Amino acid sequence: MSTTLTTGDRVRCTMQGCSCEGTYIASRNGMATVKLTSGYNIGIPEENLTRIGISEMGDNPSEEIIQDSSLPHISIISTGGTIASKIDYRTGAVTSQFRATDILNAIPGLASLAQFRAVQLCNILSENMTPAIWQQLARAIYDEIKAGAQGILVTHGTDTMAYSAAAMSFMLRTPVPVVFVGSQRSADRPSSDNVMNGMCAAKTALSDLGEVVVVMHGTTSDDTCLIHRGTRVRKMHTSRRDAFETIGDEIIGSVQYPELKITISPHAVQRGTHDLVISEHLEERCALVWYYPGMKPEVLSAWEGYKGIVLAGTGLGHTGTDMIDRIKKMSDAGTLFVMTSQCLHGRVCDRVYDTGRDLLAAGVIEGEDMLPEVALVKLMWVLGNCSSGDDARRLMRENLAGEIRRRSPT
């Protein structure tokens, strides 16, 4: 390499007869870091680089997009994630953007669907989501709908998106669509799903829905996004673009891409069905405990004094018999236990075997066909909003936001 490189320069990498192109990031001790056009970074000796283009960095602001005031109003509430992001060539990382202009530039075509207002709630990795942030998010959504938003987009990291969607399903009654959307692949990768997911989510936010949903890729191709109810969805794969699935229920609908043809299922909650209501109180002293063979009763002592515990039991909803005395002791002391199943399909029934009957006698509530993580979020909400234990037990058995089905599908 005879020419001094600047961060952001386009370079050709040549080594052992192979050649590829990318963006120069930085060098240290004679080794350069280059971001390839595939989106991945490599380390390569500086002498194996040739500059083929000047730096792509600069302080040029995003092109201002004039929004059409005659279009419906959608609010974008950002919690982080990579759906609207760009490359920082100094580090090779992808950083989230929050201004309406940045998002409209990152996802071409949005401006033709609606006029957007962007609200930055926080900028976190989704594994750092907390019940306290859920309360802030619920209030932000409430305020935006109150101010006239005809739909809400919540951009969110995918790892805990299902938890947050479930939380909003219990904390809010919404007359308009509240749509969670994210991306599995960052915006700098050719296989990124941010544009398609964003367009399909915006179309969903303008639809006749009146509930909280998640919109993500439905196949590995760029042809369909699925609309999942916020209390029945789970991330089922670490990296596939079609990672999200509806469990134990039918999907709410779908959006064909690129034509953006939307189909809504008959069992979806319709726009305007509910008046806008917020109940943001949560009891954070709740836990989700996954039972495993040989688990010692003493394990539960870590949650002594907690107000609620969701057990993810085996099969129909069981733990080992040696757990029952500890469960009863804690239940008598005021901890509300809810039994769910580690199986993804089917429902809890603790009246079939002796163990199940003993668990019921110890004070455990059957969680029906709720997903364990949804039961946890619901338990936080129920205990945060009920004045008596009897009311809490009753509400945990009731279907409040599509989390319980009267009959399990075949």
Image (cartoon, rainbow, N blue to C red):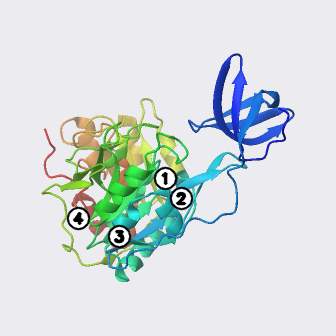
Q: Earlier in the sequence, mark 4 or mark 1?
A: 1
Q: How many residues crowd mark 2 within 10 Å: few (<14), some (14–19), many (20+)? A: many
Is 55 in front, or is 385? 55
Contact, mark 2 vs mark 1 (Cβ under 8 Å): yes
Q: Is residue 183 left or right of residue 302?
A: left
Residue ID for mark 2: 80
What percent of the width, then of the height, locates residue 28?
A: 84, 37
Label annotation for residue 114: 3
Image spot of residue 25 (x, y percent): 73, 43
Return the residue found at the far bottom: 147
Q: Mark 2 vs mark 4: which is more N-terminal?
A: 2
Q: At numbered mark 4, what does the secondary structure look like: helix, strand or loop?
A: loop
Q: Which residue is mark 1?
A: 157
**Mark seen at residue 102:** none
Q: Residue at x 29, y 60 (%)?
A: 204
Question: Mark 4, mark 3: which one is toward the viewer?
Answer: 3
Give above or below for 338 relative to 13: below
Using the rendered image of the protein, determine whether residue 63 is visible from the camera's viewpoint.
yes
User: Counting residues from the N terminus, which is met first, the one under dot 4 or under dot 3?
Assistant: 3
Cβ atoms at labels 4 and 3 below 8 Å apart = no
Q: Alpha-carbon distance for marks 2 and 4?
A: 25 Å
Q: Give 62 or 128, whichever is nearer the viewer.
A: 62
Query: Where in the figure is residue 302, as x and y percent of width and height?
Result: 54, 49
Q: Amino acid at mark 2?
A: Gly
Asked which secondary structure carries label 3, the reply is: loop
Identify the mark at residue 209; answer none if there is no mark. 4
